[in-house]
Image: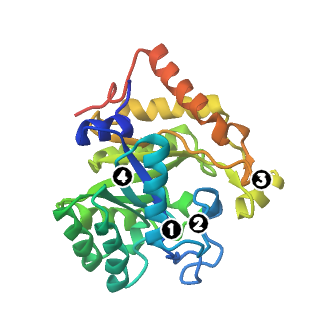
Amino acid sequence: MRYNNFSSYLKKKYGEKVWKISLHAGFSCPNLDGTLSDTGCIYCNNKAFNIQAGTNSQSLDEQIRSSIQRLRKTRRINKFIAYFQTYTNTYAPVATLKKTYDTVLQYPEIVALSIGTRPDCVDLEKLDLIEGYTDTMDVWLEYGLQSIHNRTLKKINRGHTYEDFLKAVRLTKGRNISICVHVIAGLLGENGDDFLETIQAVVDLDIDGIKFHPLHVLKNTVLEQMYYGNQITLLKAEEYAEVICDALEILPEHVVIQRLTADADEHFLVAPEWCKKQNKMKVVDMINEKLETRKTKQGYHYDD
């Protein structure tokens, strides 16, 4: 393996395979509820990643219990990460957050808590609460950065700045909380150098994990309208694999690669074709093959 993939990291840490359970806790987002915007990021359609998004079909407890039962039966998994994935999972009063996060404590099978959020939606009080869970389990905070370039963040209607991200990281550092950063390759107006500037900035902050995403078009988004209006150009699979290899080579070996590429259900995906779920492993294989051809690996060009 030429990169520090999350599955191997978890197996080494916990002694067996660990599975992330994606959860929808009913939170919203300041970029959707009118606080910052009512349209969200131009690519946003959370239903493409979690079918529970925007519905109340299952309680949080039911989501956890049914997922554990299913994965035990079908995959023989016995340890889990509770991943609060959908929307912004620190966007509520602290009392509400505590009640929500406390739900996972009922399940001894859950060895870690992972919370997906925006960098402009944390503060000291919320971080104090989240740090409290590190007494009983590992905790990850997943910050959606996407790009360090404010011009890009404005184009995608992200609603926060790079400076907001830097503040969130500063407030989180020094606690027993692992930081994972989400970045997107192929954003509007960006080239490979722009993306690698984002990666280098993340490297300089000494974060713990990273998730790579390609820009892809989902139904019922602003980006879909732009795509059909011929206003955007999407990366080809080959181009994406190249820039991800470039990124891996400058990431230090200890950074955990939680996601190498993203995919979407074909019912939601508009383009590109290679981002369909059934094509995900082809992209992963392509990245591995390119690293092998280059005779490089994660950290190959990392400069202490």
Q: Which residue is mark 4?
A: 80
User: Looking at this rendering, what residue extends furthest in the front direction?
Assistant: 73
Up the image or down, 133 lies above or below 36; here it is: above
Instruction: Give the total number of marks visible in the rendering.
Output: 4
Q: Secondary structure at mark 4?
A: strand
Mark yes or no: residue 44 visible. Answer: no
Q: Amino acid at mark 2?
A: Gln
Q: Which residue is nearer to you in this view: 196 or 214?
A: 214
| Residue at 75% across, 57% down | 224
| Residue at 63% across, 79% down | 38
| Residue at 16% across, 64% down | 135
Q: Nearer the viewer, mark 4 or mark 3?
A: 4
Q: Which residue is mark 1?
A: 24
- Residue 244: percent from the left, percent from the top? 49, 34
Measure the alpha-carbon separation of dots 3 and 2: 26 Å
Please tell me the numbered disc located at residue 52.
Answer: 2
Q: Is there CB contact under 8 Å for labels 1 and 2?
A: yes
Q: Secondary structure at mark 2?
A: loop
- For the N terminus, give its image quadrant: top left
Measure the alpha-carbon separation of dots 4 and 2: 19 Å
- Residue 156: percent from the left, percent from the top? 61, 61
Nearer the N terminus, badge 3 or badge 2?
A: 2
- Residue 250: percent from the left, percent from the top? 36, 33
Q: Amino acid at mark 1?
A: His
Q: Residues within 10 Å of mark 4 (few under 14, many from 20)?
A: many
Please tell me the numbered disc located at residue 145.
Answer: none
Q: Secondary structure at mark 1?
A: loop
